[in-house]
Amino acid sequence: MTTAPPVLTVADFATESIAVDQLAQAGYVIVPNFLAREHCQQLYDYALGLPAQGWQQAGIGRADNYTTNSAVRQDKIRWLRADYHYENAYLRMMDQLRLELNRELFMGLFDYECHLAHYPPGAFYRKHLDAFKGRSNRILTTVFYLNPDWQEQDGGQLVIYGERGEVLETVLPEAGKLVVFLSDVFVHEVLPGARDRFSITGWYRLNTSIGGVVDPTR
C-alpha cells in the first residue's frame, strides 16, 4: 500500500509577522517547528528510502566552474523535481512562502530551486557564501532540517558568521527547523556530525535568466 504524499502548508513563518520582521532587520531568521512533526517524519522517511543512485556527490560553483572538492564539502544531494509526489509537496509549500515573502517584504522573488542534502557521519561543508554580490540571482537561502531526536552531541550544526567573522548563530539541525538568510551576506559552514544528517537546502531567486539559462555564467 502506497502512503499518500503529505499536504504541506506554510506554518509559523507565513503567519508570524515577528519572523518576517526579523528577516527584514537582521537578514536572517530561525524558525523552529516550521512544519508539523508528522510531515517532517514523512519527508525524512522519503529521504531514507531513496536508492543510492538517487543521490550525487555535491560540488561547488556553477556551470563551467562546477567541480567537486571533498576538502570543501562532502555531502550528497538530490535536486527536487515536481514530478515526484513528496518533492512536489515541498516545492509547493515553499512557493507559498515565496508569495508571502513578496507580499510582506516586496522582494521580487521569482522562483525557487532546492535539493535534499545527506551528510554521512563525519561529513562537513567548509565556510562559504551561497552567492556573490552582483554575480548570482540567488537572493535568499533556506535550510530545512529533517532529523528526528537530534541532540547537541550529534554535531552537524550550521554556523552562521557575521561580517567581522564572529559567530552569530550555531544551529542544531533538528527536525522541523527552518533557517532563512540572505545568500550574499552570511558566510556559513556545516560542522561534522556523528549521525547521518538530512536537510533540504534551497534558494529563492530573481529572474535574471538570459536566453532561457538560469543564473548564467558571467
Image: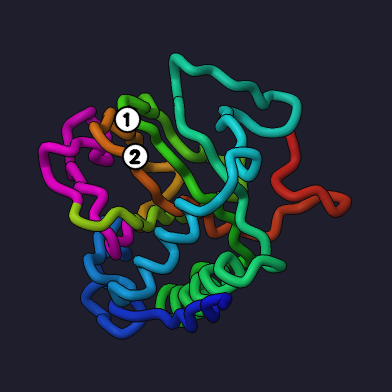
Measuring from the top left, give residue 121's x and y in whole percent: 32, 30
Give the quarter of the image for residue 114. bottom right
The residue that appears at 40% across and 51% down in the rendered structure is: 199
- Above or below, 150 against 125 in this view is below
Q: Are marks 2 and 1 in contact (CB under 8 Å)?
A: yes
**Towards the viewer: 199 or 208:** 199
Where does label 2 land, which residue? Answer: 196
Residue 75 in the image: above or below residue 32? above
Q: Which residue is mark 1?
A: 121
Q: Is residue 39 visible?
A: yes
User: Does the magenta-highlighted stretch encompass residue 33?
Assistant: no
- Rounded to the nearest angstrom, the CA distance separating label 2 from label 1 is 5 Å
Task: Look at the image and give the residue range highlighted in magenta.
Answer: 150-179
Query: Could you tell me the amino acid type at mark 2?
Result: Asp
Give the image location of residue 194, x and y in percent: 23, 32
Measuring 71% from the left and 54% from the top, which residue is drawn there? Answer: 208
Q: Is residue 5 above or below residue 211?
A: below
